[in-house]
Image (cartoon, helix red, strand yellow):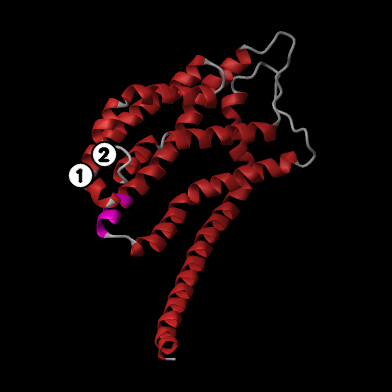
Amino acid sequence: MATPELGAPESEEAQQGLFAHLLELRSRLLRAVATVVLVLVALVPFANRLYSELAEPLVARMPQGAHMIATEVTSPFLTPLKLAFYVALFVSMPMILYQLWAFVSPGLYRHEKRLARPLLAAALVLFYLGGAFAYFLVLPAAFHFLIAVTPQGVEMMTDITHYLDFVMLMFFAFGLCFEVPVAVVILAAVGVVDLAKLRSGRRYAVVGAFAIAAMITPPDITSMMMLGIPMCLLYELGILAVSWLIKPGDAKSETG
């Protein structure tokens, strides 16, 4: 009879702790969602202008007299709003990641915090750089190629919704591909690879980078090179980051 009485306070304390964590998670999520909503409300009046800027890499290279089209009745209204939501999510990402960090960080050890802070910041910056790289360099080259190979007698008129989906897919793909240094550091931190294996695996990394580039980019050699070469350079940056951030005993202590 004494055992349940002794265990009851511990069980009640555990439930209270879980309830407190759930309340904090709810609070963090509400703050993140509120940030996205506020940014979205601020961007809605500029939704059409945002879409015009997004379409510029294609519109500037279309033949004289060609234009984009909307094949659905609600597309002229909903597609710019959809873009405004994507931009709001993109702009709000620092706050979203901060709320995630504020919730998770109390449960991390000091050495884990030391590694997680720069990785989180680097992941955010690299994702932004990947999106900017796709917009300013890759998309213009890709659209130039696609328009150049359009068959004679075929008029290129791209649907605005399909264009948005394609561009956002490219942004997301390039943003993820630019996370190579972060992925390399994480793999080294958990002991999957070490510095020697990373250096000896350069040839495989190059093959993998260009294979991924061939699958993601439009079917032209220029776009493939514009993703494959940066991924190889980012792999080298990851090796440097491992040599700076991961001490020889860190991975062993993590896995042990």
First to last magenta residue range: 110-116
Magenta-drawn stretch, dominant element (helix, strand or loop): helix
Q: Residue at x 54, y 55 (%)?
A: 36
Q: Is residue 174 above or below residue 97?
A: above
Q: Is residue 57 left or right of residue 162?
A: left
Q: Residue at x 34, y 46 (%)?
A: 119
Marks 1 and 2, Cα distance to the nearest angstrom? 8 Å
In the rendered image, residue 146 lying in the magenta stretch gets the answer no
Task: Give the number of callouts.
Answer: 2
Q: Residue at x 61, y 17 (%)?
A: 146
Task: Give the residue pinned by disc 1.
Answer: 247
Q: Which mark is residue 71?
A: none
Residue 44 screen position, x and y as percent: 62, 49
Name which residue type carries label 2. Answer: Val
Crowding near pointer 1: few (<14 within 10 Å), some, many (20+)?
A: few
Task: Give the residue pinned by disc 2.
Answer: 242
Crowding near pointer 2: few (<14 within 10 Å), some, many (20+)?
A: many
Q: Is residue 230 left or right of residue 218?
A: left
Q: Is residue 189 left or right of residue 126?
A: left
Q: Residue furthest top?
A: 152
| SS of the residue under disc 1 | loop
Q: Using the image as rendered, state which of residue 122 and residue 256 is in the foreground.
A: 256
Upstream in sequence: badge 1 or badge 2: 2
Q: Is residue 202 above or below residue 127?
A: above
Q: Residue furthest right?
A: 73
Residue 21 screen position, x and y as percent: 45, 70
Q: Is residue 165 above or below residue 101?
A: above
